[in-house]
Image (tube, rainbow, N blue to C red):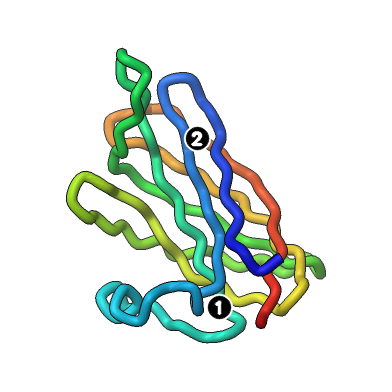
Amino acid sequence: MHAQAAGNTDFGDYQVHWSVLPSTFIAPEVARANDLQRSKGIGIVNISIMKENEDGTLSPVSGQVEGKVTNDVQQVRFLAFRRIQEGDAVYFIAEYQYSSGELMTFNITARPTGASQDLPVRFAHTLFSD
């Protein structure tokens, strides 16, 4: 129950990959480098936009990501995504607060650079504090 959750949604030419994990799972040096808080009750949502190449492989692309998270009593918080580039990898991360065992519903919109289409992704996940 403690492990991170991950999934993806296919939009034809693009896929949006997501993962959710407790901030305490992040290595201290990674947290420091990216100005992230490692503490109980703070989760990290990680989004990446992948473009399908003609040979079927996927390449990460840049773009914009925005979204919000809703807890089980319908409190909505907007997510402030930051773009992180490491070599060829590009991903977008945001922090959010949660209570252990609380079901959080994410509504995310990704827009790849140069694309006119929005890629809406919705998923729900429950994190448990240690």
Q: Is the residue marked by circle 2 packed among few (<14), some (14-19), or many (20+) residues within 10 Å?
A: some
Residue position marked by numbered label 1 in the rendering: 42
Give the quarter of the image for residue 40. Answer: bottom right
**Going by the image, does 4 lie left or right of 35?**
right
**Spot occupied by residue 20 in the image (x, y as percentages of width and height):** 56, 60
Q: Residue furthest right?
A: 73
Q: Measure the C-alpha gap from mark 1 to mark 2.
A: 26 Å
Q: Residue at x 31, y 15 (%)?
A: 55
Circle on res. 52: none
Earlier sequence position, callout 1 versus callout 2: 1
**Between 114 and 105, which is closer to the camera in this rendering?**
105
Q: Amino acid at mark 1?
A: Ile
Residue 26 on image: x %, y %: 43, 73
Which structural element holds mark 1? strand
The local secondary structure at tag 2 comes to strand
Location of the N terminus by quadrant is: bottom right
Residue at the image position 45 percent from the left and 65 percent from the top: 94
The crowd level at tag 1 (other Cα within 10 Å; few <14, some 14-19, many 20+) is: some
- Amino acid type, residue under disc 2 in the picture: Leu
- Quadrant of the drawing holding the C terminus: bottom right
Instruction: Name the image quarter holding residue 122.
Output: top right
Comparing 31 with 25, the one in front is 25
Image point 21% across, 45% down: which residue?
88
**Residue pointed to by mark 2:** 119
